[in-house]
Amino acid sequence: MTFSDTSAMAPFIAAVLVSAAVILVDLVWPGRKTAALTATFVGLAIVAALTVAVGQSGTTAFGGSYRVDALTTFLDLLFVAIAALTAAFAPDYLGERGLPVAEFNAVLVFAMAGAMLIAGAADLIVLFLGLELMVLPGYLLAGYHKTDGFSTEGAIKYFLLGSFSSAIFLFGIAFMYGMTGTTRIDAVAANLTAVVAGTAPFSPGLGLGLAFLMTGVAFKIAAVPFHYWTPDAYQGSPTPVTGYLSVGPKVGAFAVIIRLFAGALLPMAAQWNIAVMVLAALTMTLGNLVALTQDNVKRTLAYSSIAHTGYMLVGFAAFAAGQIQGLEGLLYYGAAYAFMNLGAFAVIGAIQRKTGVTSNLSTFAGLVRREPALAWLMFLFLLSLTGIPPTAGFFGKFYIITAAVQAGKTDAWLYVLAVLAVLNAAAAAFYYLRIVVYMFMRDPDTETSVAAHGRLVWTGLAVTTVMTIVLGLFPGVLLDAVATAAKAIG
Amino acid sequence: MTASGLPLITIVTFLPLVGAIAVAFTNGAKPNQARYVALGFALVAWVVSLLMLGGFVTASGTQFRETYQWIPAFGINYSVGADGLSLVLVVLTTTLSWISILASFSPIQNRVKEYMVSFLVLEVGMTGVFVAQDLFLFYIFWEIVLVPMYLIIGIWGGKNRIYATIKFVLYTLVGSLLMLVAILATAFIYQSGHNGSWQNAFDLGSLIAWAQQGHFNGSFGILAFGAFALAFAIKVPMFPFHTWLPDAHVEAPTAGSVILAGVLLKLGGYGFIRFALPLFPEAAHWWAPLIIVLSLIGIIYGAIVALVQPDLKKLVAYSSVSHMGFVTLGIFAFQQQALQGAILQMVNHGLITGALFLLVGVIYERTHDRTIAKMGGLGSATPVYAAALGFFVFASVGLPGLSGFVGEFLTLLGTFAAIPAAAVVATFVMIFSAGYLLWMLQRVAFGELSEFLRGLGDHLTDMKPVEAMTLVPLGALVVVLGLFPGLILGLISGSVNATLAAVGQAAPIALGLWR
């Protein structure tokens, strides 16, 4: 390990250290929420600063198995933001239920470190390590409310299917290694280029490897028909965790897709892109259709998150068809989705602050009279999730559909996907607006007392609100970043 | 910008937004604060729009232009401007907005602050649609309109409001999202034709110039026009996309109906004239026969269904379907008088139907019922009200001397020159129009005071000054524009000629046999 290795990986190393530090702080001042939270936020600020400092240097570490480029920086900063917002939203909810805050933050930061490892992976083994490091803490978080049966049930489902899919994914990596003789991402790509050019033999094992890898990541992003774990895991988890799970591991899994399919497997895009397009079409449509029939808001948003996976896959399919804008759109959408979805879950979490408050639609009845600020914020996030301008969600959709329409020139199926995506957006409006109907247009069944919300929750909500509006009105602030990040791959 | 250097369009568009923010800071316990602040801002926006009218130079096309870079990566600009057509519709919007706000003072007693905020945001969206010169900007305003209207119907509407508002949003959203794909595809074709540069790819002027060279012809144009036309047809609404309208109208609060009929429906007609026709001239001719047939069906269907409506508001709503059919008919005749007539008809329908909805609201506030069968004899009990109703009913029927007549007459005249058969059919339907409106007037105003109304006793008062204040300006405009239609025709002549130059005068080929 040389100094340059360390400096390239400094943000990741710092993230792991922050996680350890939070536990240490809790050992020194047991049960002191403020201390643990301070350690978390200061630590995350340091990680963010280091990420910016290491910058887009293009340096590699550990013999080329880890690489820092503009994409790494972009994703790392997004992961830090997601972790920080989750840490801001959680304490109110956890504290009320007697769940420890320090451990939560430590596990959360650990998961973030895993995601950061994915973002910088230049080797399939590192990629897998990062993936596992990201999802294992996720299982813990899903079952964090250990006295709650639903939380445990969701966690077990998540764990079983998650490990299963990890195994499939690993199997795919093994095939790739067997067929190409390397795990280095650029070497795999070079090898596959030769295969596509006909200078190296194509073997069925390669096809199997592709299929396994595709299946593995499809599980992780919860693409239909590999989504069955999502609704239960999302509904059962403590609400702040649901918010995190719907965003952090999802963007992380997309980072896997980008590093793997856009990096290592791009030469064979013509072979696998049809699968991506079918997945995208199924995922958006089924996610939305099932969401229409839900009467629990967390479950609705779980299915809606499946639909959003589908939109992002449309962007990726456009990229695979040769439009760099598809990747840019995917990254933009990922960021927009992170803020608006975290915001929406923060509102749900705030409403559920008191123990025993369900996330059923009826809880939202007449919310605007009880907590007008939360209701209006939720309205904004739901508009953004629907894709109504001028919000972040709209510009994300705009970006992805632009890319799909452009790619339609080379592959006409992408026209179909673009039209399907907007029709889905219209269908989604129905269930998002139904929540609005409950909040604004119905009277509550019973009078529920208003809970006070901590300063952290309001700060986090302010951040997600501002980002949701700014990314919609002034997308220019992020366009350069996503363009350079996408160029790092393309 | 004008000679005075003030960015008048930006002011008139975003002043209501400032108003909305101001209203949000008023004291919720004192609803009058919200009411007067909202009215104040709407009035100032109205005055600014009148200033624009004063500063408008008839002969020089799109004016008051402001262009700033917004999202350079996609060549998207904040670009606004107004020609005669835009200006007329902006003034219609600002006028109806303050009237609607004033008309909401007494009916809306619940969550006044949020209501006024919604209304002012609605005004921003509507004005923005009429002045946007960039397709992206246009789309944003187009969608913004949806949100406050959704709340206005859904929160302050009648019994079935939730069903009505969701139907309204979903219908509109399906159309507009497909239009978004068409907008993107159009911009992309422009971009590919300019060496991959996004510069001006969403700029309306550049796109129309590009369209004139035939770049949007062929099957792409037909598909893209179809997507635009669907969005506009739903808004107008054309048969068979009209089913959201009666629901939305019946459930919306009075002022919501006024704005819905007065401005929102005009967004569709405006969209056809401003975007669909000049961008896809070839496709417009290809689609014209279908649209003309649908317009005729709409005219007839709306009139017949209105004839049998037991509910006063539903009757006016279906009459909208019929009247707006004249607008699309006039637009797709591709003929000067017909297009002039269509635009006049849009303005007149906004004024007259807006007034009719206000009048329905006036009686509803007293009776809490809109069933025609329960009315009767209002002429003796509330003479002023009955006179006002009679006046606007005659205006709607198309009595010469009032503005409704000029629009329909010009539309039919122009259509007759282009497609005689369609004009003949439409003219006969005007008899129906007289039928359902006059019959309604007879049942409501004439005869003896009905049992139901007598039971109201002292509650059945005649018009209050505030209510009269909302109707007098509309009535005055109806008379003035009826006697001097040249006021508007002069303003819009440039827009009409530009549109016809872009789309071509020829009558649709498939209807050539009808000549």
Image (cartoon, coloured by chain):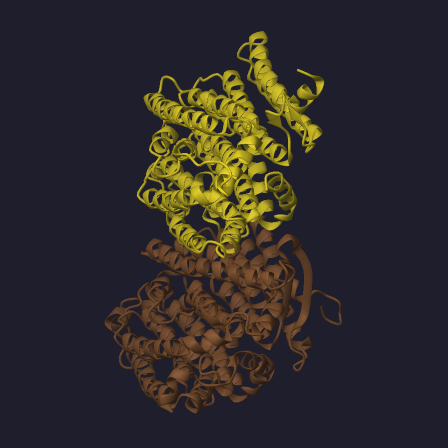
Chain colours: A yellow, B brown
Q: Is residue A423 above or below residue A64?
A: below
Classify residue B56 as left or right of residue A437. right
Quarter of the view holding residue B41: bottom right
Of residues B308 and A5, the one drawn nearer to the viewer in this rendering: A5
The x, y position of residue A21, in whole percent, is: 60, 14
Q: Residue at x 51, y 60 (%)?
A: B185
Is residue A234 in view?
yes
Q: Is residue B40 visible?
A: no
Position of residue B46 in the picture relative to residue B234 (left or right): right
Quarter the C terminus of chain B occupies: bottom left
Q: B298 or B16, which is in the foreground?
A: B298
Is B507 above or below relative to A453?
below
Front one among A92 and A203 = A203
Would residue A180 appear left or right of A7 to someone viewing this image? left
Q: Position of residue B264 (x, y in %)?
A: 47, 66
Residue A151 at x, y percent in the picture: 36, 23
- Where's the N terminus of chain B, which quadrant? bottom right
